[in-house]
Amino acid sequence: MRVLAEGKIEQLFSILDSSSELIQKAEDQSYLDSLIDTLSFMQSDDNDFEGLTSADAKKLTNIYADFDADQYTAETIRKGIQMAFLKAIRIDKIQANYQITPDTIANVIGYIISGIFHSKKELTILDPAMGTANLLTAIYHQLETSIGVTPTISGIENDDAMFELAADSVELQKIHAELFHEDAIQNVLAPVVDAVVSDLPIGYYPIDANAKGFETHSESGHSYVHHLLIEFGMKHVKKGGFGFFLVPSELFQTTEAKQLLKWMQGKVYLQGLLNLPKELFQNSAAQKAILILQNSGNGAKQVDPVMLGEFPSFKDQQAFTKFLTEIDDWEQEDLL
């Protein structure tokens, strides 16, 4: 079954790649823009390949003749698009903040969420910096499988290309989602949800006037965008709800962290900070962690102990499984 699934992923990637390369050459544009055009063309019924010669249009028609969306699972479509986007990152040299969240990390976050919300019959999730929506949809599929819940998902993305890719990906996967093409820092009217999840962009937010409405804004100069998005995210979580954020491992060790810590007091509980294996990052400064926050209210309390630690190597299956068991025990005996 696994071999069959991998074959279908490669088959879909081949279609996406062949089309994107053809469009890239014909239109003299980036691979990413060509991939976005590809996804748009694949969902169009009229075969109106605007701007292309009749010869290129005929080639595309032949490429798409091998594509039948009903022959692919939603998860296969997600992974096929993920492979194509990974090629776009390499070919177009896309900046670090637009790197895709690896499935190994998405699966770990999804596992933690599954444990916390295992008894829920309905679940709403928001990603305030969704990028291509790969993390959001990966968790969506994981929750369907692991706890039998189809979440209601929402996402916010400011970048034009990332938003278009996310919208096309969600549509091809036949997922009902509410997507906002907005800058979350500009007070988007997003829904209040059970959980927020996000692989946060790291760095400074350029528009100081927008950041002034946030308690986590810097007292001088630009503010950290990941601080602002954590605050935004938790403001859109129900009382007692959770936030799961991919953050720098040294989140609380910077001089700017005092504003973040000040905002957290009395509003949210720091329930966990789990460093991801160092082997996943090019250098120790780039290491990330999973930050688990819980809003106050609705019976929420500061957990004792806070879940702190570092995942063992994902290659060490025995140690990794043992660590997941420790997380399970912590969730059931201390957190919930």
Image (spheres, rainbow, N blue to C red):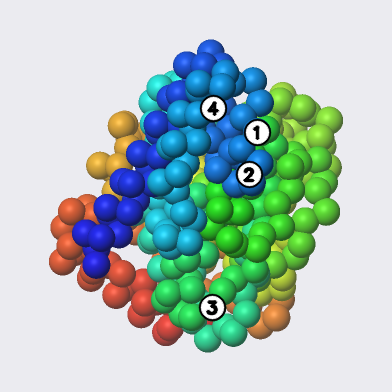
Q: Are marks 1 and 3 in contact (CB under 8 Å)?
A: no
Q: Residue at x 72, y 70 (%)?
A: 238
Look at the numbered disc 4 and give the secondary structure of its residue. Answer: helix
Going from the N terminus, do you reach mark 2 or mark 3 first?
A: 2
The residue type indicated by label 2 comes to Ser
Q: Which amino acid does label 1 sit on?
A: Asp
Secondary-structure class at tag 1: loop
Q: Residue at x 53, y 13 (%)?
A: 28
User: What's under tag 4, amino acid-wise?
Assistant: Ala
Q: Which of marks 3 and 4 is nearer the N terminus?
A: 4
Label 2 secondary element: loop
How far apart marks 1 and 2 lie (CA) works out to 8 Å
Residue receiving disc 4: 57
Query: Going by the image, does 4 lie left or right of 182?
Result: left
* The quarter of the displayed image where residue 91 is located: top left
Q: Is residue 67 visible?
A: yes
* Residue tagged 3: 149
